[in-house]
Amino acid sequence: DAGVIQSPRHEVTEMGQEVTLRCKPISGHDYLFWYRQTMMRGLELLIYFNNNVPIDDSGMPEDRFSAKMPNASFSTLKIQPSEPRDSAVYFCASSPKGWNSNQPQHFGDGTRLSIL
Amino acid sequence: AQSVTQPDIHITVSEGASLELRCNYSYGATPYLFWYVQSPGQGLQLLLKYFSGDTLVQGIKGFEAEFKRSQSSFNLRKPSVHWSDAAEYFCAVGANDYKLSFGAGTTVTVRA
């Protein structure tokens, strides 16, 4: 079975540019999560969706960040304009409904973002 | 709100020796507890989870963890480590809203 697929794997861009990260969750999963990982702050939950609807975006750093899930098989995380402090690894994860499943929160391999 | 503390930032262990990684959580209700492993350049892979029942849970790759409610702990153990166990390990607690809160992680180095 295909896991959570993220693209691109690496992104290097100059500050001020728009960055779009993409995620394809596992088919049939109801929940989708976006995380950011940095040395200083560890793993932070940015936002999560249930059935394509944003449930909690309290972790989104500021208005420069936005996330959408137009359908059950695709989500984007956009940063506009980007800043050097946004450099991090961004993970997408998906989960079936309920904690009591065999594999809660499958993670993608992440997008390593560098803002110059 | 729930939180997780992993007291050890870095642990070095000899190949073949035992390993124990500490995890303490804070949560008002019965927690859902997880251990994930992250190899360099990779995403997080679930090692094991605890929801209820037997407090000693077995996971993949020969790992086990024990839930101790009185100590608010969920420590991860492996009797004999292999060089391939070198990675970063994260403890996490889940709440009823399906959000996971992660600890800061423990990096494990395995020496020959």
Image (cartoon, rainbow, N blue to C red):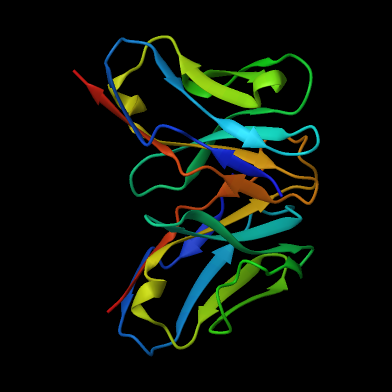
**Eyeballing the image, is B82 above or below B93?**
above
Going 61% across and 25% down the picture, which residue do you hit?
B73
Where does the image place residue A110, in percent across and percent down from the top left?
A: 45, 57
| Whether residue A2 can be seen here | no
Where does the image place residue A114, in percent across and percent down from the top left?
A: 32, 71
Going 58% across and 40% down the picture, which residue do you hit?
B4
Q: Nearer the viewer, residue A111 or B23?
A: B23
- The image quadrant of residue B50 is top right
Where does the image place residue B7, in percent across and percent down from the top left?
A: 45, 33
- The image quadrant of residue A88 is bottom left
Q: Number of labelled discs? A: 0
Locate the C terminus of chain B and report the quarter of the image it occupies: top left
**Eyeballing the image, is B88 above or below A50?**
above
- Left-right relation of B78 to A35: left
Q: Residue furthest front?
A: B70
- The image quadrant of residue A99 is top right
| Whether residue B13 can be seen here | yes
Going 79% across and 32% down the picture, which residue do you hit?
B30
Where does the image place residue A28, in percent across and percent down from the top left?
A: 74, 53
- Left-right relation of A52 to A13: right
**Eyeballing the image, is B52 above or below A70?**
above
